[in-house]
Amino acid sequence: MTPFELSVRFLLQLAAIVAVCRIVSRVGMRFGQPPVVGEMIAGVLLGPSFLGHFWPSVQGALFPPASRPILFAGAQLGLVLYMFVVGLEFRVDLLRPRLRSAAAISASGILLPFVLGGAIAGVLVRHAGFFPPDVPAHTAIPYLGACLAITAFPMLARIIFEKGLTGTTVGALALVAGALDDAVAWAALALVLAGLTHDPRIAWTAIAGGALFIIILSTLVRPLLRRLARWGAAGGPAERSATAWTLVLLLLAAWCTDAIRLYAVFGAFILGAAFPRGAFAARLQSLIEPLTSILLLPLFFVYSGLNTRIDLVNTPALWLVVLAVLAAAILGKGGACYAAARFCGETHSDALGIGILMNARGLMGLIILNIGLEHGVITPALFSILILMAVVTTLMAAPLFSRCCRPKISV
């Protein structure tokens, strides 16, 4: 396809994506699901699991392979912008009296699901059809452990935002614990890829680079952010210039964390969390959030949905594996986070809310699964099983939280 044809097709794709996301989100809201979950389902519906299965010619014409790079670029931009807004909403002051709880929840939310996932991998690696023959157990075990330990951080952040939980203990603890869990899971993935490619620089770059990024942001970049905040608060042309330079810093931060294999969302979120609060931060949020949520962020869900094949799970044996993986995921993540929060003195309602929210895996799970499939760590059959686990645990989160928890706003 020519560049002109691709640009015209992209406009049609945007129209279809926004329309389908709005319709599915409206239906999902009737069943207690936030709009973000409807957009996740819409992405799967527009992919080969539904549209491509029943109307392959329509799906092929609407989303030709040549257009995938454009969708991916738009999806990355939408995700980066939205996670910056989530960072702007993040209240660090809620965590200062509860750092012990955040650390314990994060550690528990990593350790137990990682162990359970590793145990399942130890069994599956001995049976054909789940891992390629050339993938050793010491690669399969940490990879599956990371898949179960990961949290749907962007989706978790959006559920918290849409339900008005950014000012609650539950929301703050879940966000920090989810961010830490995902950082560790991505570091584990870097170790897996380093072992698979026999290149330890991948792991060292991810771990050391992430620590260096936070240090530089806290020491060298933060004074610049304070100057931008004062500049932008003046309004008029100064605000426009400050907005432009803030976006430059945002894109550079996302590029840095993506380059070190920690994914762009972490750079965006950390920069937003470090940005000084005030009139300019509120203005940035009002400028960026509406268009990003409606137009750009759904591209992320649709791009991931185009790589999803749920129809591959088609035998009783595979469904038994699905149930085993699902049980390990729910008990390992949700149960461990609930127990850790209760141990640290949180109320039953808050601990239950944290466990429910942390159990969602969403499309961060889909990303790590696509990376594993691309690098030949797992087979398409296991990929589809883990996709179902990610979808089910995410669909559970919002309705269970609404039914079981009523968090109070912290002040």
Image (cartoon, rainbow, N blue to C red):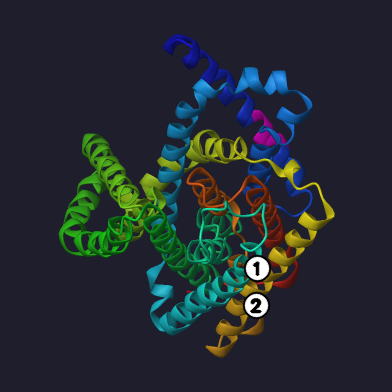
Residue occupying image coordinates x 48% and y 38%: 292
Question: Would you say residue 407 is visible in this rendering?
Answer: no
Which quadrant holds residue 159? bottom right
In the image, is residue 368 part of the stretch drawn in magenta? no
Instruction: Give x and y (percent) for residue 342.
Output: 59, 86
**Which one is in front, 15 or 125?**
125
Q: Amino acid at mark 1?
A: Val
Instruction: Give x and y (percent) for residue 113.
Output: 58, 72
Looking at the image, is 253 positioned above or below residue 168? above
Instruction: Give x and y (percent) for residue 382.
Output: 65, 52
Q: Amino acid at mark 2?
A: Gly
Q: Is residue 292 left or right of residue 159?
A: left
Residue occupying image coordinates x 61% and y 31%: 18
Image depth: mark 2 or mark 1 in front = 1
Task: Indicate the secondary structure of the residue bearing disc 2.
Answer: helix
**Which one is in front, 135 or 181?**
135
Q: Residues within 10 Å of mark 1 (few under 14, many from 20)?
A: few
Q: In the rendering, which numbered label is found on residue 335?
A: 2
In the image, is residue 21 part of the stretch drawn in magenta? yes
Q: Main secondary structure of the magenta part?
A: helix
Instruction: Give x and y (percent) for residue 47.
Output: 66, 33
Mark 2 and mark 1: span between their CA atoms?
23 Å
**Which one is in front, 202 or 355?**
202
Question: Would you say residue 305 is visible in this rendering?
Answer: yes
Task: Indicate the secondary structure of the residue bearing disc 1.
Answer: helix
Which quadrant holds residue 321? bottom right
Looking at the image, is 296 positioned above or below residue 89? above
Where are the magenta residues, as a range? 19-23
**Sooner in the amino-acid sequence: mark 2 or mark 1:** 1
For disc 1, the marked residue is: 123
Q: Residue furthest right?
A: 316
